Image (cartoon, rainbow, N blue to C red):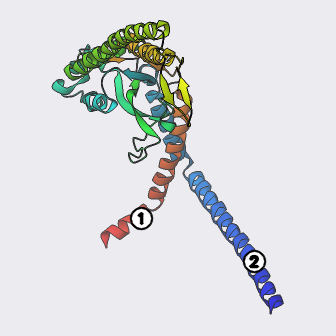
Amino acid sequence: MNMEENNTKEINLLQLISMFFNWLNKIGRKLLNTIGFIIRLCYRSMYTFIIIIVLSLIVGQYLARPSARTYKAEAMTMLYGGEAQTVKEISKQLENSLSTNKLISLSTKLSLPDSVAKNIVEIKSFYVIDYLNDETADKIDFGNNHSLTDTLNVRMSDRLYLQLKIRKINQLQQIQTAILNYFNNNRLLQNEFIVKKDEYAQQIRICNLELQRVDSLAQVSYFKDNEKQLRFEKDKLLVGDQKKQLFYEDLLGLQARKSYAEMKLVDFVQPVDMPSGFVVNPSPLNGRVKYGIFSLLIGFAIAVIVIMLIDNLKNIFSYLRK
C-alpha cells in the first residue's frame, strides 16, 4: 500500500513539473508571436512609426529643456514647542495652494514675488518614524500610511520632513527663508514656543535652588556628630550608629536634569528651524536621458496603437455603421 502511494506521489510530481514547463512553453510562444506581430505591424507602416517616435522624442526633450528642469530639495525640520501634527496641518496651507487664485497662491502666503513663487512646483511634508521609541529618527513616512496603533514605531513629535520641487536652484535660499518665516510667524506656534522655553528655564531655576539646598543639607549632615542611640537589631542591643547619609546621587541627578534643560534651551531660537537647510539633489527629475527613455517607450506604445487603428479603420467604420 505504501509503495503504491509513493508511486502515485512521484507520478503527480512529474506531471506537475511537465505541466509547468508546458505552460512556460506556451507563454514563450505567445510572447514571441506578439513581438513578431508588432515588428511586422511597425515594418508595414515604417514611416508612421518613425514620425511618431521622432515627435515623441522632440516632446520629451522639450520638457527636459534647461529652463523647465525640476529639482528635488529636502530638509529635516526641527520643531521647538509645537507638535508635528500641528505643524503638518499648518503646512497643508502651502501644500494645497493654487497659483491661479491670488488669495491662496504661494506668492501671497509666502510673501514671495511671482517670479520666484511660480518656480515652486510642489511642497510636501512627511512624518518621521522612530523605531524602538528612543528619540532617534529612523524612517521617513513618504507614503503617509504609518499605523497609528503601533506603539513601538511611533511618529516623532518634534520634527517633520519637508520636500520641495523647484525649477531654479539659485532661488532655494529665498524660498527656504520664506517658508521658515511662514511657520515662525504663526501665532499658535509662537505661543507654544514661548511656553516650552519658559518651562525649561523654570527647570533650570528649580535645579539651581535644589542644588544649593541639597549641598547645604549635605554639609550639615557630613560635619554633624551623630548622637549615640540605643536600638535593637536582631535581638542585639546596639549603642550608637555612625553611618552618614550621602547626597551625591541627588546632586548628580539634579545636575543631569539641569544639563538636559540647558541643552534644550540652547536650541530654542525660533519655533521652527532647519539645521542643515534644504539639500538639493543635483540630478533633475526631468533630465534629458531619463525623459529620452520615457519618450521612446511612450512613443513606441502610441505608434503601435495608432498603426493598429489605421490598419483596422475599415473594420471600425463597418462596425460603427451597423
Q: Which residue is drawn at 71% across and 76% down?
A: 16
Left of 94 or right of it: where is 51?
A: right
Q: Residue at x 81, y 86 (%)?
A: 7
Q: Which of 122 and 78 is in front in this view?
A: 78
- The answer to whether residue 136 is seen in the rendering is no
Q: Which of 227 and 52 is in front in this view?
A: 227
> For the residue marked with disc 1, what is the amino acid?
Lys
Q: Farthest bottom residue? A: 1
Q: Distance between the residues labelled 1 and 2?
A: 51 Å
User: Which numbered dot is residue 13?
Assistant: 2
**Element type where label 2 sits in the image:** helix
Looking at the picture, how far across and down is residue 117, in whole percent?
Answer: 29, 19
How many numbered markers are drawn? 2
Check the image and report above or below for 135 versus 191: below
Residue under pointer 1: 314
Front label number (1 vs 2): 2
Check the image and report above or below for 2 versus 305: below
Looking at the picture, how far across and down is residue 82, in whole percent?
Answer: 30, 25
